[in-house]
Image (spheres, helix red, strand yellow):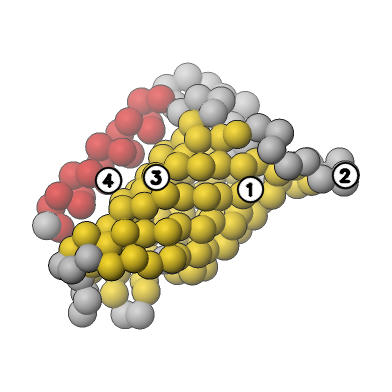
Amino acid sequence: MLKKIKTSLAVILLAAVACHAQARPSRDAGHFGVILGLPTGLTADFVVDSSNRFFGDLGAWSGDVAVNAGWLHQFPGVMQPKNKNLRLQTHLGAMMHGRLGTTDRWGAGAVIQENFLFKGSPFSIFVRFTPIFQIGPETDFRLGAAVAGVFAF
């Protein structure tokens, strides 16, 4: 099972790197940062085109290793604050979630994410909500959430 996770993550990473073969302006290539929530650890995403990105999270959760991988689609202009120094990006997508350790779990679900971008800064924050349908070892429904501080590259 662990081999399947490694293979899946390698395929996602290679696809993202292949899409980045062309030069992109700053902030348009992706993000890397620290995530708190589901899971607590590291997060990275890579922009595929102007509307789509792949993401992956790796971290610890209650003593277990947690892995998320997924895809996000951006919906521009859904919400825009009056403050011109702050820009919002609304994303909707799908993800796979795995947890290895004392309680192995596997699931899939939707992703709702809101990015808060600060004008002139490579740092940003995002909030992510993930309703997850657990498909192994038993079926269950869980609601996950996370907040992250990320650096754009």
N-terminal of the pair, mark 1 or mark 2, is: 2
Q: Is residue 134 visible?
A: yes
Mark 2 residue element: loop
> Could you tell me how far apart the alpha carbons at marks 3 and 4 are, in whole angstroms?
15 Å
N-terminal of the pair, mark 3 or mark 4, is: 4
> Could you tell me how far apart the alpha carbons at marks 4 and 1 are, in whole angstroms?
23 Å
Q: In the image, residue 111 lies at what x, y percent?
A: 46, 50
Q: Name the amino acid, label 1.
A: Asn
Of residues 38 and 143, the one drawn nearer to the viewer in this rendering: 143
In the picture of the structure, the residue carrying the numbered disc 3 is 94
Q: Name the amino acid, label 3.
A: Ala
Lateral position of residue 146 relative to residue 107, left or right: right
Report crowding for label 4: few under 14, some 14 to 19, many 20 or more residues within 10 A (C-alpha). Answer: some
Q: Are marks 1 and 2 in contact (CB under 8 Å)?
A: no
Q: Residue at x 18, y 44 (%)?
A: 7
Q: Residue at x 45, y 57 (%)?
A: 130
Mark 1 residue element: strand
In the picture of the structure, the residue carrying the numbered disc 1 is 115
Report crowding for label 3: few under 14, some 14 to 19, many 20 or more residues within 10 A (C-alpha). Answer: some
Q: Nearer the viewer, mark 1 or mark 3?
A: 3
Q: Residue at x 29, y 74 (%)?
A: 64
Q: Are marks 2 and 3 in contact (CB under 8 Å)?
A: no
Q: Name the amino acid, label 4.
A: Leu
Q: Nearer the viewer, mark 4 or mark 2?
A: 2
Q: Residue furthest top?
A: 22
In the picture of the structure, the residue carrying the numbered disc 4 is 9
Instruction: Say the numbered circle drawn on residue 82.
Output: 2
N-terminal of the pair, mark 4 or mark 2, is: 4
Residue 35 vertical position relative to residue 27 in the rendered view, above or below: below
> Could you tell me how far apart the alpha carbons at marks 1 and 3 are, in whole angstroms?
16 Å
> Could you tell me how far apart the alpha carbons at marks 2 and 3 are, in whole angstroms?
30 Å
Instruction: Say the numbered circle drawn on residue 151.
Output: none
